[in-house]
Amino acid sequence: MTRFGSSEPVPGECPADVGCPPVTPSQLKIPTPVVDPATVPAQLVDLAKLSDSELSAGVTRLIFTDSDMAGRAYVRSLMERAGLVVREDAMGNIFGRWVGSQPDLPAVGSGSHIDAIPNSGAYDGTLGVLGPIEAIRALRRAGFKPKRSIEVLMFTSEEPTRFGISCVGSRAMAGKLDPKHLDSLADILVPDGGTFRQAALKAGYANTTADTEDMVKQCSLGEYGTYYDSFLELHIEQGPDLEDEELSIGIVTAIAAPAAIRCAFTGDGGHAGGQVMSRRNDALLAAATLTIAVEKLALDTGSNDTVATVGVLRVGPGAINSVPRTAEMEIDVRDVVGARRDEVVSKIISYGEQIAESRNVRWSHDIVNSDPPETCAPKVVSAVEAAAKRLNLGHKRMVSRAYHDSLFMAEVAPTGMLFIPCHEGYSHRPDEFASAEDIKNGIEALALALASLSLA
Amino acid sequence: MTRFGSSEPVPGECPADVGCPPVTPSQLKIPTPVVDPATVPAQLVDLAKLSDSELSAGVTRLIFTDSDMAGRAYVRSLMERAGLVVREDAMGNIFGRWVGSQPDLPAVGSGSHIDAIPNSGAYDGTLGVLGPIEAIRALRRAGFKPKRSIEVLMFTSEEPTRFGISCVGSRAMAGKLDPKHLDSLADILVPDGGTFRQAALKAGYANTTADTEDMVKQCSLGEYGTYYDSFLELHIEQGPDLEDEELSIGIVTAIAAPAAIRCAFTGDGGHAGGQVMSRRNDALLAAATLTIAVEKLALDTGSNDTVATVGVLRVGPGAINSVPRTAEMEIDVRDVVGARRDEVVSKIISYGEQIAESRNVRWSHDIVNSDPPETCAPKVVSAVEAAAKRLNLGHKRMVSRAYHDSLFMAEVAPTGMLFIPCHEGYSHRPDEFASAEDIKNGIEALALALASLSLA
C-alpha cells in the first residue's frame, strides 16, 4: 500500500468528531515498534498447514477437530516464546498476558480466532491472533513497558460451521450466550456428535464444570470495563475498499448487525421416475424459490450495506433418482442498520411460509441469532487513528460489514477494530491473501495503539 | 386388491394385440404354485435390518458397503436353502440357478437389486430378488419340473447413488457399459474412494480380472438370446395406478427412457458479510434458478409421462457465512418418448449455459447416461397376462416410468416386467410398503409365468 501523505503526522492527534481523551506525555514517549515483514507471514503459512482441507491451497479447521487442536498448540507455543502468561478457560478460549507495571488494572485485550470454514484461507482470524503476539514482541524489543497488562486472545469458535452459532467464546465472555440455546444446537459436522459441551469435553476442556450453564458462566468476563479497559482486533478487511483506494489501515467505526436463520422445507419425497410431476411436493423446489427470493430481498433495500446469503442448502435423501424430501437452509443477513436488517429477516420468514403453503410442503424455521450492530469506542478508534498517522500510513474510517468477536467484546469493554487490505477483497476462499508489507504495517499500528491504550 | 372378475380365465390365453406363441399342452399342465403370504414379507423385514439408515424405518444400503455385503450374504443363503446353484461374477452380480431338464438351453431369468438409496424403503428391488427365489420354492413344492433352467439374479448397483451411474451390473451383462466411462466416475460416497473397480476389489470381486475392460467383458452375457431365452422382473409399481384402480398385477409393456445429467456452477465465493451483493457470483443462485427451470421444462411438455428431477444439489464450501463458490447438481429426466426426453435434456443444458453467462459463473456438464426407452417382449407380456388370468387377479397393461435393470436385460433377451401395487405409490422413502397379499399374488403370477417360459 502507498504511504499516506499526511501533512500533520502528530502522534496521538485527536480527530474532530471523536471525543477521545487527551494525549498524555507518557503516550508521546512510546518508542516506535519495528516488525520484521517476514515473521508473521511465515507463521501464517505454518498455521495454514494444520488443516483438513483437501485443496492444497485451502484451509479447513473446524473447532475441536484434530487440526484445530494442533493450531491451538501452535498458538500457545508462540505465546510462551513471547514470554506471555498463558491460560485457557472452560470453553477453550486461550489468553496470553504480558503483565504490566500495574497488574491489578483492567487490561488491554487484542485477539481473534483460528478456526476456519471448509476450504477457506490462511488470514481470516489468524492474523488477529498472531499479529498481537508479534506486536508485543516488537514493543518489548523497542523497550516499551506497559502500565496496564496487554493480553492476546484466541477465541473459541468464531465461525459457526460446527454448531451453527458464531462467536461462541466471545458471546460467553460477554454473558450473551444462553446455555440452553447452546445445548439445543446439534453438531452439523459429525452425525450424533452431540452438543458443543460434549465436543469441548472430548477436546479436554470444560472438565471442571458441572454443566453447560456452569461452563458458560465460568467464561464470563464480568461487568463492563472490569476485566478489560479496552479491546482492539486486527483483521483483514474481507472487502475490496482499502485495496481499491490504496490505503494501508481501515479504522472501524461500526460493525454490521448479523442475523442467522436456519430453516427447513419437508415434503413427502418419492421416486423420480414413478412419481408424476403433479403429485410431487418437492422440498428442493421450495428451497430454490426461497434462495432466489433472499437475493431479491437484500437488493430491494437499495443499500450496499444490506447483504443476505444462503450459504448452506442440504438436500435429503440426496439421490438423483429421488424427489427431494427435505431441504435444510442456513441464511445469513447483515446490515449496519439493525431495523433494516430485521425487516429483511422477517420478509424472508414470511416468504418462506408462503412458499411452503403454495408448494404443499412443511416448513420450520429458527432465528439462531440476531445481534444488534455495534459502534466502536471513540478511545479505541482514536488510538488506531493516531497510530496510523504517526506511522504515516494511508488510512480511513469504515464500517465492518463482516462481524467478528469484537461485536461481543464491545459488551465487555470499549472496543475497536483495525483492518488491513486483502487481495481483491477475497475471504473465506483458498486465495485469500494479504501482503507481507500490509501485515507489517497493520501489526506496527496495532502495537502502537495497544501501547497507548495500556498507558491510559 | 380385489379379484378381477374375468369371464374367461383361460390359462395361456393370447391377448389380441400381442403376437404371443401358442399355448402348448405342457404349459396347460403347470401345477398351480401356492405361496405362503408371510414368508417373503418376513424376509424383506430381515433384509431391511441390514442397513446404514439413521431412521428406524428407513433403509440405506449403498453398493459394496458393509450393509450391502451383509445383504449379499443373506441373498446367497436364501438361494442355497432353495437348492439353487449359486455363482457370482466379477462385478458382484449373483446368480442362483434351478437347473432344468434341458440345461444346455438358454435359461429363463428373473431378478432385481438389493442396493438402496439413503433412507429409502424395504421393497424396491428386494422383492424382485426374494420373490423369484420363493417362486421357485413354490413351483418345486407343486411338483413342477422346468425344461429350461430358471435363474434368479441379484444385480450389482442398480441405484446410481455411489458412482452416479445406474444399473451397472445389467449394463455390463448387456455389453452396454463403457469401461473408460466407468473408470471416469468418482465415488460420490467416500472422498477419494476411487473407482467402481477399486471398490469392487475391496469387496472381494474382480480379483481375477486384469483391468476394468476385462472385468466388464467377463460379465457380458453374449449375443441376444444365447444366455437367457427370456427375462422377467418382479417389482413394486412405484406409482399409484394399481392401488387407485384396485388391481393386483401390472403388466409392463414399455419402460421409460432415463437420462442423467451431472452439472456444476462455479463462482468465486467470498465472505457473506464482507462481499457486497453487486460483487458476487453466487454458484447456488445459478443452481436454484436452474432447479426451478427443470420443473418448468418437464411441465411444459404437457405430458404426465415427462418427469424431471434435481435430486442432488451440493453447495461448497457450505458455510452460512460464505457465499457459495460451487453448486453441483444431478438431474434425472425420463419419458416414454425418447425424442421428447432428449428435447428436455437439451433445453436444460442450454438454459444452464444461459444462467451461467448471466450470473457470471463457470459451468460444466456431463450427460452421464441417456438410454432409449424399451418395449417389452410380447412373449413375456403374454406369459404374465396368462398367469394373472389363470390366478383370477385384476390386472392391466401399463408403462414403467421408473426404469430398472430390465431396461438393459432387454438387450440380452426378450424381457418383461410384472408390477404389484404399493401403498400410495410411495417409493424411495421409509414408508414404502406392499401388502402381504399383493406380494403373494405377485410371486404366484411370477412363478406361473416363469414356469410357462421355461417350457417354451
Image: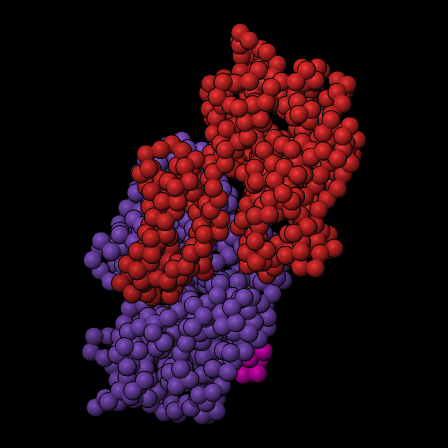
Chain colours: A red, B purple
User: Which span of residues is magenta-colored?
Assistant: B77-82
Based on the displayed image, in which of its 4 quarters is residue A2 positioned? top right
Horizontal arrangement in the rendering, residue B292 relative to residue A136 (left or right):
left
Horizontal arrangement in the rendering, residue B271 relative to residue B331 (left or right):
right
Verify whether residue B78 appears in magenta: yes
Verify whether residue A112 appears in magenta: no
Instruction: Please determine whether, in this image, residue B304 is positioned above or below residue B294.
Output: below
The structure residue drawn at horizontal position 54% and vertical position 78%, both measured from the top left corner, is B46
Taking depth in this image into account, of B86 and B278 the one nearest to the observer is B278
The structure residue drawn at horizontal position 66% and vertical position 36%, both measured from the top left corner, is A228
Q: Is residue A173 visible?
A: yes
Residue A123: x, y in percent?
Answer: 59, 32
Horizontal arrangement in the rendering, residue B392 relative to residue B405 (left or right):
left
The structure residue drawn at horizontal position 73% and vertical position 26%, both measured from the top left corner, is A147
Instruction: Please determine whether, in this image, residue B86 is positioned above or below residue B176.
Output: below
Q: Quadrant of the C terminus of chain A?
A: top right
The structure residue drawn at horizontal position 32% and vertical position 65%, both measured from the top left corner, is A275
Instruction: Please determine whether, in this image, residue B382 is positioned above or below residue B89.
Output: below
Based on the displayed image, in which of its 4 quarters is residue B230 positioned? bottom left
Taking depth in this image into account, of B413 and B168 the one nearest to the observer is B168
Tell me the chief SS of the magenta region: helix
Horizontal arrangement in the rendering, residue A248 relative to residue B302 (left or right):
right
Residue A304: x, y in percent?
Answer: 38, 32
Residue B218: x, y in percent?
Answer: 53, 60
Taking depth in this image into account, of A259 and A428 the one nearest to the observer is A259
Residue B284: x, y in percent?
Answer: 41, 44
